[in-house]
Image: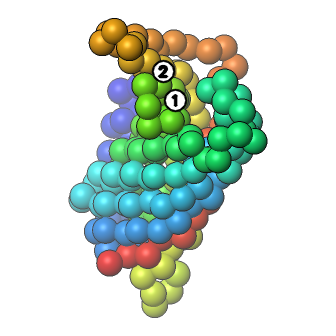
Amino acid sequence: MRRTYITVLLLVALHSLPAGDSSLSMGFQAGFATTGSIVDMSLELLSLSVGFNVPLGYSHIAHTFDADPDASLFLLYTLSGDATIAIPFGENLILKAGMGAIALTDLGPRITGVIGSVFKAEYWLWESNTALFISVLIPVRRFEIIRQQGGGTQRSAYSVPGLEKEWPYTSSIGLLYGY
């Protein structure tokens, strides 16, 4: 694991060409679990991304919360976030790798989600502040937080065999506009 981090840091040091001139980008992403707005901030080598979304696979995800997808009209939301290291390749292409999470919530007492590795590719279009991107989160752990009515909180994080095969559900494509 340490060798991977050292290799990534060396690649970043070797590729110092800026792809996107903007340090703040906002846009839209579309995916099974994450369809909605996204904000991306670049801080030198580190990039932070946060999204507020409605799941495109709403009816499938509603069953996770034991909710009737026909009775409840979009009462579940997903919050996505990641911290990545940017590796510029040329003037227009940036590859990013890091850690991220997607949390499903009904804005009530229950939050459940996944944590894992994130890989992104951003292609900044010539002569514009617009970028196309693809983001893949490979989940490795699932977590759940449930607040009890009596005031206690139940927290759990666990590994699920085969969870890493669910990456198509946690992937998204989108468009960013740099400011």
Mark 2 surroundings: few (<14), some (14-19) or many (≥20) residues within 10 A: some
Q: Which quadrant of the view contains residue 25?
A: bottom left
Q: Residue at x 66, y 24 (%)?
A: 66
Q: Residue at x 48, y 20 (%)?
A: 144
- Nearest to the observer: residue 41 or residue 74: 74
Above or below: residue 148 compared with residue 29 = above
Dot 2: element: strand
Q: Which quadrant is the N terminus positioned in? A: top left
* Residue at the bottom extreme, as displayed: 127
Q: Which quadrant of the view contains residue 155?
A: top left
Label ID, residue 54: none
Evaluate whether residue 146 shows in this view: yes
Above or below: residue 162 compared with residue 9 = above
Evaluate whether residue 116 shows in this view: no
Question: Could you tell me the amino acid type at mark 2?
Answer: Phe
Q: Are marks 1 and 2 in contact (CB under 8 Å)?
A: yes
Q: Which residue is mark 1?
A: 113
Question: Could you tell me the amino acid type at mark 1?
Answer: Gly
Residue 57 pos. (x, y %): 71, 45
Q: Residue at x 52, y 52 (%)?
A: 53
* Residue at the front extreme, as displayed: 71
Residue 12 pos. (x, y %): 34, 54
- Nearest to the observer: residue 77 or residue 100: 77
Q: CA distance from mark 1 to mark 2?
A: 5 Å
Q: Residue at x 44, y 52 (%)?
A: 51
Residue 126 pos. (x, y %): 50, 86
Q: Which residue is mark 2?
A: 143
